[in-house]
Amino acid sequence: MSTFNSLYTVRSGLDAARRALDVVGQNIANASTAGYSRQEVSFVAAEPGQVINSAGRGISDANVLRYRDEFLDRQYRNRAGSQGYFDTLSTHLAQVEEIVGTLADGNVRTALGAFFTSWDNLALRPSDPALRRQVVSATEEFLAQARATFDDLARTRSELDEAIRDKVGDINSATQQLEALNQAIVSEKNNPQKTNELLDQRDRLLDSLAKLAGTSNVLHNDGTVTVFLGSLPIVDPNGSFPIDAAAAMQTIGAVAPLTGFTQETTRLTWNGTTNSVTPTSGEIGALLSLRDKAVPEQMQYLDNLVRTLATQVNTLHMAADKNGNPLPAAMQVPIFTSSSGAATLGTGWMDIAVNPALKADPSLLVAGDTLLAPPAPPAAPTSPPAPSDGERALKIARLRDAKILTGAPVGTSQVTAGEYMRSVSSVLGLQLQQAVRKGDAAGLQVAQAEKYRQSVSGVSIDDEMTKMIQFQQAYNAAARVMTTLDEMLDIMINRTGVVGR
Amino acid sequence: MRVTNQMMASSSLAHINALRSRTAALMDQISSGERITRVSEDPAAGAAAMRVNSRFEVMKQWSTNLDDAKTWVRATESAVTDVSSLLTKAKDLAITASNDTLSPETRQQIAPQADQLLQDLLAALNDLEPNGALFGGFQTSGKPFSVDLTTGTVTYSGDSGDMQRDVGPGVTLVANMHGNRVDNWASGNNMLTTVWNLSQALKAGDGAAVRATMTNLETARQKTVSLRAEMGARDQRIEHLESKMADTLLQLENMLEQAQGVDMEKAIMDLTSAETTYRAALQVGARVMPPTLADFLR
């Protein structure tokens, strides 16, 4: 046993205590850093040397441990994905509800009511030119409101599309960072403290990716990670694979005879291939489902409402009179035309306008339902109806309570226009309510998972203070041993063998 | 379970936030008086509120229609009353003039009265107030009746249009009474021709001819009395519908209140208890958060 061996043993204790205090300092400094995992030095008593009966060779700090539970991480990420999904869904559905109409002012609803009322009033005084003008302007107003709502919905789709591109950017930047981290973690694997910080960064990125796109991940033994979006890998130990976002004109709801609606939207593909990426969870999943389902649905409902109504009104307005005598060609004026003014409605969604001829001359409206005979024979009735004959206007006004609408969201049942709009509002309200509830529930679960995670990984000041005292005392004790050894050596070196000096 | 400082901080923050948003929601309800402003807040109540609102709209239209029908019915009623009293006068005149004690000269002197009656009758039947010809059917712009003073022939230029007014769920009311309901104008016994006949008979001083008009005058008068009764019945029906409509409106208001309104007592109780909890949470947060071992180490 060498003379100074014990000194080195004690020195290792001093080193270890300082090292441990370093880590305590690091923990306290990061007590409120998001995503930080607390660390602890794990000490191992150094093995004794070859000498028989020797004590150990002090302490060797084998590793800096990082407290982290992979299972809790997985739990957290699964729930963060659905929280991201439902929170995004409810935020945007609330905007859609705002557009389609709240209880106080359903714009299209009000305008539709005014439209029917104008016909009702025309039926009361069929020859009043002011009331005819009112019918035309109520029709214009109804279409304008429907068109404004439709345009707002289309604009919402573009905004959603922009948000999708932003999220894709976020995802790609996260995957690039993960690629870099994967490499760094492998190359730094001999530097535990540094690796721990890298692993924290990696876990933070995985958390945010899970919230963004509901990704899943596989951790490898060397600390690297593979991330899947659906079934496609976006990061693996060898690199990252970006999602490409290319804008193209895309058509929704094109079912013959309707050509639907065409708008420039983004198509997501994987890593330069044509494989399309369709996340169904996380924020981007919600954005995609809003863009491609919830919002187009509302647009389609609106088109269905306006189209059915326009067709019915046109039919009634141009039908033969109640005695079966067809209206003369000059009196067969459609109320609604296509946007370009063609006599038949357009096939694209909302390709419907008020007949421009009618706007110029409201007297073209036919309010009566009995054609009169012309003064001279042949006496087939072709003359305009009597001035107070409002029976046709009444028929059109009665469409208010006619069960004329069918299709989503009311299914195959026939409902009135009012019932249809109420169903649309109710369905949307239910969707939103459900999204809010599910988002709240997922939020609670995320909070719960985060709590458990914090319970493992979080820094407790009390813990750290206790450790601080512990290591300070350990340091003091080691220093004391050092002093004792020093005194012993002093006796040995300076006072031994001085007999007779 | 190991509890860290951050956990305590974030959970107490989460609770405080939740309580604050609950308090804000209750405050909104109380200050606006409306429990829901969006369908999504309570889809079932929202649907009910929308249904009630759309019924309000329809009721408003029905009430407009009813007012319009009332105008027509009242005007028609009073015109029919006029016609009826004119016919009574004509009959009285005929009774007086048919008296055998009168000389033909005297009858001739009475003749202008009959002419006047004819003009008055024509005017009553051609009444244009307030919304156009009352008895013209859909032909409301011109005067529907004219009498050829040389032949006594009556021309009716109106039609048989019934003005339908929707005044309730599936309830329709005819607002007007077209000329063909008043009399059979093609017949030589119609009221106008009969009065013209009376005047002709008077001018001729022919007592028997005057007497001959009396049956027709009486028939026409009785007919107008029954028409008047019919209009009276319609008027009563309108009043009945009006009061029923007021009841329904009240019911609708109630339904709307139930669907959308706030139960004030409950809302205020909830607010108070939410406030208490909020205060407690703040206090507990203030107590629990700061102390750590660091505070007690020297």
Image (cartoon, rainbow, N blue to C red):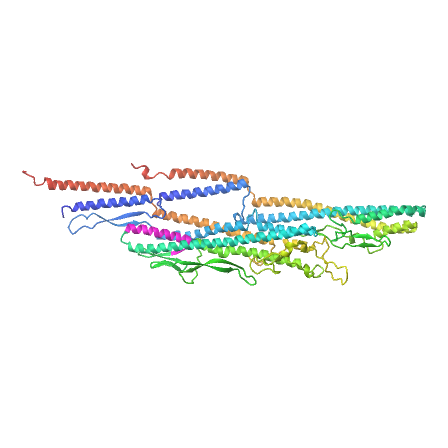
Asked if the magenta segment contains residue A225, the reply would be no
A463 sits to left or right of A57: right
Residue A194 point in image, percent of width and height: 29, 50
Location of the C terminus of chain B by quadrant is top left
Q: Is residue B167 visible?
A: no
Q: Main secondary structure of the magenta part?
A: helix
Q: Is residue B71 visible?
A: yes
Residue at 30% from the left image edge and 37% from the top image edge: B297
- Nearer to us in this view, B99 or B285: B99
Q: Residue pushed farthest front?
A: A360
Horizontal and vertical percent for residue B143? 78, 51
Q: Nearer the viewer, residue A31 or B150?
A: B150
Residue B244 position, x and y percent, is: 67, 45
Q: Which residues are magenta?
A: A192-216
Q: Percent from the top left, x then y, of residue A491?
A: 12, 40
Q: Residue at x 37, y 48 (%)?
A: A452
Relative horizontal placement of residue B9, taking residue B245 as reference (left or right): left
Q: Quadrant of residue A273?
A: bottom left
Q: How many marks?
A: 0
Whether residue A178 sits left or right of residue A339 in the image: it is left
| Residue A213 painted magenta | yes
- Whether residue B67 sits left or right of residue A67 in the image: it is right
